[in-house]
Image (spheres, helix red, strand yellow):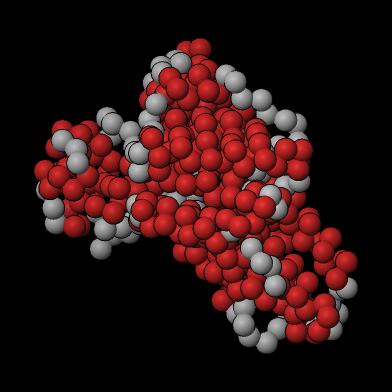
């Protein structure tokens, strides 16, 4: 059998090939996803774009495949410079797999203050979406921190495990955002494992927050909501008492539930969860400036999620309207800024405002280059603008297409 490079195929070709592999007709696939046969035909001949994560997930489940097979993720580069981040994945995977084995670190292990500074750098790289550098630096720090958990005094061991949990979260950020879904699931479980040993009373809540995201790929919307609601119930007393960490986690859980409900196409539930998250932020007050658990439970993120919910519900006009009221502070983490501009671009594109959509995409890429270049919805938006190419933005969209390895 001749080798087929999925990245060289169109989305429609991948859908058609997967459907034939499954041995089903266009009519049967349409029945499984609740669409007309003409819609399936339009997708397969690339006249209808798959411009929704929820839709891709539903289609992938109907075809009994992972969504990444439809989107051809991960998007590897053609040379060492373009492939940075991706090339570090095997070593990240190896370190995650040997989490409970004897350490292999051969040098001197740094003292906890130095290790804490190193993990703070990982957190900064993660916030700035500098995934190439993050991927390069994470494996060795995981190895050193694993050694620290074995070698440091008993009184420092829980602190060492806490730092290891942060390093595992850096690994998860690389894996999830570069398109390695299976590795993200492993990293999430390692965060839980290290958090428990660190004595973090909220480690199960953070695990639920991360786990729910991994349930999206299989369209397990109700399961994701159940995981999030259980986590909320487990910290309800602390939330009611006004503990800042609990308020921040509650708000983060509700925002994730809002996106989950929106992808489930339950608008009432999505906006209800959004209001609950806003209440948590109001109760945090000035304490929202402290980024508890790196969740960005603050007013700008509430506003950003308002745009995201509208996009996930397929409401372009509402997304554009809400985006007009969003104020992005200069110190807001790059991932939040990048996601917002991408969502705004998608809403503008659905409203037929192509020039404005391209400008928003350019802002997204400038804010978070690796995040946007590796995001399937950014890829689809660029492809749509290339298909609808106008003289007014021809050179700009082609340059963006080249940077995203589409052209």
Residue 353, position as x, y percentages in the image: 46, 16
In front of the other: 126 or 398? 126
In front of the other: 241 or 204? 241
Q: Is residue 270 visible?
A: yes
Name which residue lies at 46% across and 64% down: 182
Give the left or right position of residue 69, taking residue 240 as reference.
left
In front of the other: 360 or 54? 54
Residue 304, position as x, y percentages in the image: 58, 33
Q: What is the quadrant of residue 262 in the picture?
A: top left
Residue 380, position as x, y percentages in the image: 42, 35
Q: Is residue 334 visible?
A: no
Name which residue lies at 22% across and 44% down: 33
> Where, quadrant-wise, is the N terminus in this rendering?
bottom left
Name which residue lies at 65% across and 49% down: 247
Q: Is residue 263 above or below residue 358?
A: below
Residue 137, position as x, y percentages in the image: 72, 61
Name which residue lies at 59% across and 45% down: 251
Looking at the image, how many numbered discs can be counted on the residues?
Answer: 0
Q: What is the quadrant of residue 39 in the picture?
A: top left
Give the left or right position of residue 307, taking residue 108 as reference.
left
């Amino acid at each position: 059998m001749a080798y087929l490079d999925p990245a060289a195929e169109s989305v429609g070709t991948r859908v058609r090939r997967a459907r034939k592999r499954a041995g089903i007709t266009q009519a049967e696939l349409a029945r499984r996803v609740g669409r007309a046969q003409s819609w399936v035909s339009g997708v397969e001949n690339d006249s209808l774009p798959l411009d929704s994560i929820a839709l891709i997930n539903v289609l992938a489940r109907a075809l009994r495949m992972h969504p990444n097979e439809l989107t051809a993720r991960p998007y590897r580069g053609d040379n060492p410079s373009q492939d940075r981040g991706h090339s570090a994945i095997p070593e990240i995977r190896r370190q995650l797999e040997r989490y409970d084995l004897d350490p292999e670190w051969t040098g001197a292990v740094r003292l906890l203050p130095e290790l804490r500074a190193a993990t703070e750098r990982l957190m900064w790289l993660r916030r700035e979406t500098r995934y190439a550098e993050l991927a390069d630096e994470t494996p060795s720090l995981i190895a050193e921190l694993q050694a620290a958990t074995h070698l440091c005094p008993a009184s420092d061991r829980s602190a060492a495990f806490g730092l290891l949990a942060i390093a595992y979260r850096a690994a998860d950020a690389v894996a999830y955002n570069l398109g390695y879904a299976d590795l993200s699931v492993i990293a999430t479980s390692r965060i839980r494992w290290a958090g428990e040993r660190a004595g973090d009373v909220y480690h199960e809540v953070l695990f639920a927050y991360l786990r729910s995201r991994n349930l999206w790929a299989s369209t397990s919307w109700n399961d994701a909501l159940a995981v999030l609601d259980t986590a909320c119930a487990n910290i309800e007393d602390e939330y009611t008492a006004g503990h800042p960490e609990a308020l921040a986690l509650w708000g983060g859980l509700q925002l994730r539930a809002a996106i989950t409900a929106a992808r489930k196409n339950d608008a009432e539930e999505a906006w209800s969860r959004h209001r609950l998250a806003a209440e948590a932020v109001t109760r945090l007050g000035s304490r929202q400036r402290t980024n508890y658990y790196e969740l960005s439970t603050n007013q700008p993120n509430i506003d950003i999620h308002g745009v995201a919910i509208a996009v996930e519900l397929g409401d372009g006009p509402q997304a554009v309207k809400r985006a007009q009221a969003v104020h992005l502070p200069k110190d807001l983490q790059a991932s939040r800024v990048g996601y917002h501009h991408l969502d705004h671009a998608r809403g503008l594109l659905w409203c037929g405002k192509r020039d404005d959509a391209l400008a928003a995409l350019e802002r997204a890429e400038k804010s978070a280059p690796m995040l946007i270049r590796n995001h399937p919805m950014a890829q689809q938006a660029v492809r749509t603008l290339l298909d609808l190419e106008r003289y007014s933005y021809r050179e700009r969209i082609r340059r963006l297409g080249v940077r995203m390895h589409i052209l």
